[in-house]
């Protein structure tokens, strides 16, 4: 009897730190955040209940909110999703046993992923600089002229997207290589006998069989991309810059951080957090639908 | 004759195709490695030569000068120590508490086990960023702002860690071993320390890699929790030096190089293990 009760006590004892930390730093902040979002609060003094006013304000009246959502979505497509179109071919090539030095390539491609975003953003700031920037030097030597990458409002988003792509292509390549290794080789042999060329093989065999991995990798990209803050923060000169010219790099996560650290409006910041979270949920659901539909189609054929 | 020449054409075509693949791979190799090379080039350059046209391609001789600038403009030694203590502290504590919790979920049957495990999976999907505002406010109340505590304590039982360790132990630590240890007279806490920890090395290596690199690289959380200059971690210190009007660019790049270097060296030597650990930590998660 004593043994048996101990068997229950031990696991509960082992889980106690988790329970305590989950309740205090997991669950409580979520509930507290919902509460704050219904109040006007500077972080000190009294909280003034305003109901849904914060939400209504951002959805209907605020001059930045929809802009930040638009920029976040733009960067999601051209920063976080574009990388998969490069990562999949890279993975297919690096999965080819006839290619030499695959480990060297994998190491080099993965390097950006283990490096902190600030170091990366700082070096790219130099590369994208207008007068003395490395990229402009190359472009000018090629006779293509120079561009104000981090000043022109139309060029800020592509510059940020480039850095995001640069950091995560290698990571996705590695994920896709792992996915490719799970595809049985006899499928390709059968297709070769049927006379398919390598492009046809990849479109008809690789991509459909890779769909679950694509879903997984893209989901990670979406969740990360919707929280994009570090790169735009550095590349558009911090809170003072507010995303640079015409707020071209002012992402939703940036806006939340700005509300917290610059404006000190915790109620409003929390309201944007929940609105952004809602967007993440919706996009993830849509993405799931698309993948399920694609998979269903493949299944029927 | 025609057959022979056709074979020859085929061979040439194959060669061209393969060369194109290498061109593609090498192109991206340069794209991904050049910025790293360039950080180190700029770290050795004086402010004036950095902004020369054409830009410098080779190493300069201004390391010492840049270093002196760096330590006058930033409390850089503190920043380095802060980053190190937080990274080691977060990694060690997370390994300990997640292994403990994972052990409970993987090797015991108790009421509510399923519920707790589902809870872990749910938390796994909720990014902490969305509660950064209340978390900051809580840290103010606890007087934890500008201490190492907010960087270590809340992450000790991170869901990803519990999930990984539960999965690992459920698959690779046999129940018989625990029974044998019990017969030998060990209590469950001793089993955890003497049997489970040594046997969990592969799982711990995965969790340790992710946590170590994630913690060293963390910016957003540190930016919020450590506003004091002397408490800042390396990425935050670099960002503040950059945003400072009179910040020296050569010094900044030297600081940048020093921040990147430790992980870079470790990664080049253990890239295979580290990549595989990241993969195990994500594909399962």
Image (spheres, coloured by chain):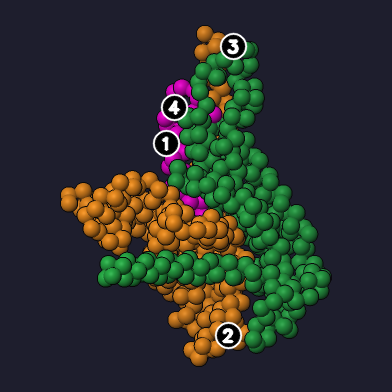
Chain colours: A orange, B green
Task: Name the disc covering residue A137, or none.
Answer: 2
Nearer the observer: mark 2 or 1; the answer is: 2
Is residue A162 shown above or below A140? above
Q: Main secondary structure of the magenta part?
A: helix
Task: Name the disc covering residue B183, or none.
Answer: 3
Q: Is residue B147 magenta?
A: no
Chain of the residue under label 2? A
Query: Is B90 on the left-hand or right-hand side of B176?
Result: right
Task: Decide: few, some or many residues near mark 3? Use Cα within 10 Å; few <14, some 14-19, many ≥20.
Answer: few
> Residue at point 67% right, 56% down?
B265
Cβ atoms at labels 4 and 3 below 8 Å apart = no
Considering only order in the chain, which callout, 3 or 4, is on the residue closer to the N terminus? 4
Nearer the observer: mark 3 or 2; the answer is: 2
Q: How far across and down, in percent of the image, does residue B144 sit?
A: 68, 49
Nearer the observer: mark 4 or 3; the answer is: 3
CA gap, disc 4 and disc 2? 63 Å
> Residue at point 69% right, 69% down?
B40
Cβ atoms at labels 3 and 1 below 8 Å apart = no
Q: Which residue is mark 1?
A: B118
| Same-chain check, marks 3 and 2 | no
Label 2: element kind: helix
Q: Which residue is mark 4?
A: B112
Range covered by the magenta-colored residues: B103-130
Chain of the residue under label 4? B
Task: Decide: few, some or many residues near mark 4? Use Cα within 10 Å; few <14, some 14-19, many ≥20.
Answer: few
Label 3: element kind: helix
Considering only order in the chain, which callout, 1 or 4, is on the residue closer to the N terminus? 4
């Amino acid at each position: 009897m004593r043994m048996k009760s101990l068997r229950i006590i031990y696991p509960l004892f082992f889980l106690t730190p988790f329970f305590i930390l989950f309740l205090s730093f997991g669950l409580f902040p979520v509930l507290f955040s919902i509460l704050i979002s219904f109040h006007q609060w500077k972080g000190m003094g009294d909280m003034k209940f305003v109901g849904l006013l914060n939400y209504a304000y951002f959805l209907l009246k605020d001059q930045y909110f929809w802009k930040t959502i638009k920029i976040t979505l733009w960067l999601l497509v051209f920063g976080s999703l574009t990388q998969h179109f490069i990562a999949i071919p890279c993975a297919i090539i690096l999965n080819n046993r006839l290619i030499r030095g695959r480990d060297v390539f994998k190491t080099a491609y993965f390097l950006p992923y283990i490096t902190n975003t600030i170091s990366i953003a700082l070096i790219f700031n130099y590369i994208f600089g207008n007068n003395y920037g490395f990229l402009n030097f190359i472009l000018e030597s090629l006779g293509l002229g120079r561009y104000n990458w981090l000043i022109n409002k139309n060029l800020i988003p592509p510059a940020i997207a480039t850095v995001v792509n640069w950091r995560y292509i290698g990571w996705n390549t590695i994920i896709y290589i792992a996915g490719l290794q799970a595809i049985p080789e006899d499928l390709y042999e059968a297709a070769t006998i049927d006379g398919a060329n390598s492009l046809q093989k990849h479109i008809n065999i690789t991509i459909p069989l890779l769909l679950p991995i694509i879903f997984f990798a893209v989901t990670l990209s979406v969740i990360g991309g919707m929280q994009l803050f570090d790169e735009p923060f550095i590349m558009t000169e911090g809170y003072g810059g507010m995303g640079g010219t015409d707020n071209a790099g002012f992402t939703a996560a940036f806006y939340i951080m700005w509300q917290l650290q610059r404006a000190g409006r915790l109620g409003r910041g929390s309201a944007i957090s929940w609105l952004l979270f809602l967007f993440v949920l919706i996009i993830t659901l849509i993405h799931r639908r698309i993948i399920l539909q694609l998979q269903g189609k493949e299944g029927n054929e | 004759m025609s057959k022979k020449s056709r074979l020859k054409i085929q061979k040439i075509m194959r060669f061209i195709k393969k060369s194109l693949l290498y061109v593609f791979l090498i192109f991206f190799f340069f794209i991904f490695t050049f910025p790293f090379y360039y950080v180190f080039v700029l770290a050795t350059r004086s402010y004036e030569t950095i902004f020369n046209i054409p830009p410098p391609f080779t190493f300069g001789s201004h390391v010492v000068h840049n270093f002196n600038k760096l330590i006058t403009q930033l409390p850089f030694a503190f920043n380095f120590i802060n980053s190190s203590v937080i990274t080691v502290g977060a990694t060690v504590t997370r390994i300990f508490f997640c292994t403990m919790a994972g052990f409970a979920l993987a090797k015991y049957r108790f009421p509510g086990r399923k519920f707790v495990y589902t809870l872990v999976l749910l938390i796994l999907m909720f990014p902490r960023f969305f509660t950064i505002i209340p978390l900051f406010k809580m840290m103010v109340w606890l007087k934890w702002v500008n201490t190492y505590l907010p960087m270590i304590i809340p992450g000790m039982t991170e869901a990803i860690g519990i999930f990984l360790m539960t999965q690992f132990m459920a698959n690779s630590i046999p129940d018989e071993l625990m029974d044998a240890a019990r017969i030998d007279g060990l209590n469950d806490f001793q089993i955890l320390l003497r049997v489970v920890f040594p046997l969990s090395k592969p799982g711990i290596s995965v969790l340790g890699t992710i946590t170590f690199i994630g913690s060293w690289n963390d910016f957003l959380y540190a930016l919020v929790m450590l506003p004091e200059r002397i408490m800042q971690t390396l990425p935050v210190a670099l960002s503040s030096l950059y945003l400072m009007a009179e910040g020296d660019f050569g010094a900044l790049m030297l600081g940048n190089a020093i921040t990147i270097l430790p992980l870079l060296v470790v990664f080049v030597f253990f890239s295979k293990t580290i990549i595989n650990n990241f993969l195990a930590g994500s594909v399962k998660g």
